[in-house]
Image (cartoon, helix red, strand yellow):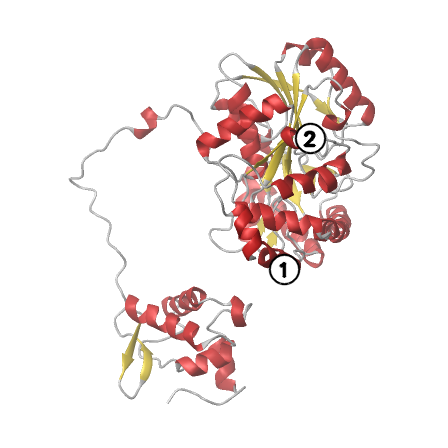
Amino acid sequence: MAPRTKGTAADLAWTSVFPAGERGDRLSYVEIMRAVIRAIEAGRLARGTRLPSGRDLARMLKIGRNTAMLAYGGLVEQGYLVVRPRSGVVVADQMPSPATPPAEAGEAAGPDWRGRFKIALADDAAGAARAGDAEPVFAFTYGQFDPSLFPTNHWRECERAALSVLEIAQWGRDVVDEDDVELVEQLRRHILPHHGIWARPDEIIITLGGQQARYLVAQLLAGRGTVVGMENPGLADFRHILGATEAVIRELVIDEGGLVVSEALDRCDYVYVSGGHQCPTTAVMPAERRLALLERAAARDFIVIEDSYDNELLREPSALAALKGLDRHQRVIHIGSLSKLVAPGLRLGFIVAPALVIRQVRALRRLIHRHPPGNNQRALAIFIERGYYRGYLRRAAKALGERSLALDAALRRWMPDFAWRHSEGASSFWVEGPEGFDCRRIAPAAAARGVVFDAGDRFFHGPDPCRRFMRLGVSSIPAAKIDAGIRALSEAVRQCRA
């Protein structure tokens, strides 16, 4: 019979086969199936090995018996396990064969798909060095989710509240292209004023993250012959979005204060700027320069597209009000995210602009999808209204501050010949290597040591993008792992120099 003792060595041996991180309700039958398949394919579970009974498996993993039986049933159906009389569930003698792709010989050639594409999009979507499919040991990539910081209990409370009968009656109906009124109100009361912005409801639209906001603005305003000024280096994705509109991109110079306000802006129809923490250098635009940019926009008749990139943790909002908050001429379109720091997978952002612009953006959004999911909007509205959002930002600011100090110390210790820039409240460092350093060349060696980072060349525009830079983020790596991670990165650099 399968082992039935409680808390025995047999239990420990079996639980090592199954997912070790989660137990109880959080463990799904799909995760159990994957774990067994991995163990079989790795040779840790031999043919004919008898598995615990469904009851024993449920006890060991602290899950429901139905979950255990669903997992076993699925594995039997797929052919990895079999049920034998008087023996129980065992590993099958013959494993299921992988699907065999059709032979290439004799196949029809198929259409020339590349020749049919009307736009050319970059293949390197993430721009980060990856260690195959393995989970990186030291993840220095920007904007990744850290479950250890996320207020799981508070969020689940808000999700449950959003699923009450009365709430469902509100967000479950077909509102065509409207947004959740409660989320818009929470934006007006608790989010936008923190950045010095006061807006009416008809001047706000909710989007599927900041990325969709950028896309909608570009589709509405840019076209063939439109001149859009962009910071160089700057946000690569927006450059690709503009490429789909056939707009003319004019590269603009930045310095330690972000975008330089100069005559180069005068030849633009639109100027895209990340003034909070400039992407990717983290530079913060001084208040005087913000005012100068707005005055020039009014005098030279161009529009400013302000991207509140990575500025949730900016200090002194009264001294560093967003460009939209300082705008007296209705010349700023403000793009923001409500989920980048909280949970990027939530995909909620917003645009603040004159009401006429918002009406057109809303009509354009309706052609793609009517509105972001109502339940997510209402749950986030409750999350903000109950004070959890602001409390989370305070905890995140403390944690990211500690990690930033640890990264600064580690860079000084292990990579003293590198230079870096980091502004207070930013969740990443902009790191410049010495002469001859190539971020793409060291990426494989770093990935082999479990280190991933954002390659810096993707932020530059031109025929010969600079490869001396890399971006190191601290949003998802614990402070305790940072020193070891930078040490591993420095070893990769030395290996490539040898």
Side of 239 relative to 420 (left or right): left
Marks 1 and 2, how far apart at CA: 29 Å
Q: Quadrant of the C terminus?
A: top right
Q: Quadrant of residue 207?
A: top right
Q: Amino acid at mark 2?
A: Arg
For mark 2, what is the residue?
200
Q: Which mark is residue 157?
A: 1
Whether residue 134 is visible here, answered yes or no, is yes
Work out whether residue 410 or residue 478 is closer to the camera in this orientation and state it. 478
Asked if 15 appears above or below 377 in the picture, the reply is: below
Count up the numbered dots: 2
Task: Classify 10 Å Cα crowding around label 2: few (below 14), some (14-19), many (20 and above).
Answer: few
| Most foreground residue, 259 or 138 | 259
Q: Quadrant of the N terminus?
A: bottom left
Q: Secondary structure at mark 2?
A: loop
Q: Nearer the viewer, mark 1 or mark 2?
A: 2
Residue 269, given in percent of the width and then of the height, sits at: 61, 14
Q: Residue at x 64, y 61 (%)?
A: 153
Residue located at (77% from left, 52% from top): 398
Question: Is residue 445 visible to the viewer in this orientation of the structure?
Answer: no
Q: Amino acid at mark 1?
A: Glu
Question: Label for residue 477?
Answer: none
Viewer-proximal residue among 292 and 366: 366
Q: Is residue 35 left or right of residue 188?
A: left
Q: Horizontally, is 336 left or right of 190 in the view? A: left
The picture places residue 235, in percent across and down from the top left corner, at: 60, 31
- Residue 290: x and y in percent read 77, 23
Q: Residue at x 73, y 17 (%)?
A: 329
* Percent coordinates x, y for residue 144 in the rendering: 60, 48
Q: Name the residue at 35% across, 76% down.
A: 46
- 376 in relation to 268, above or below: below
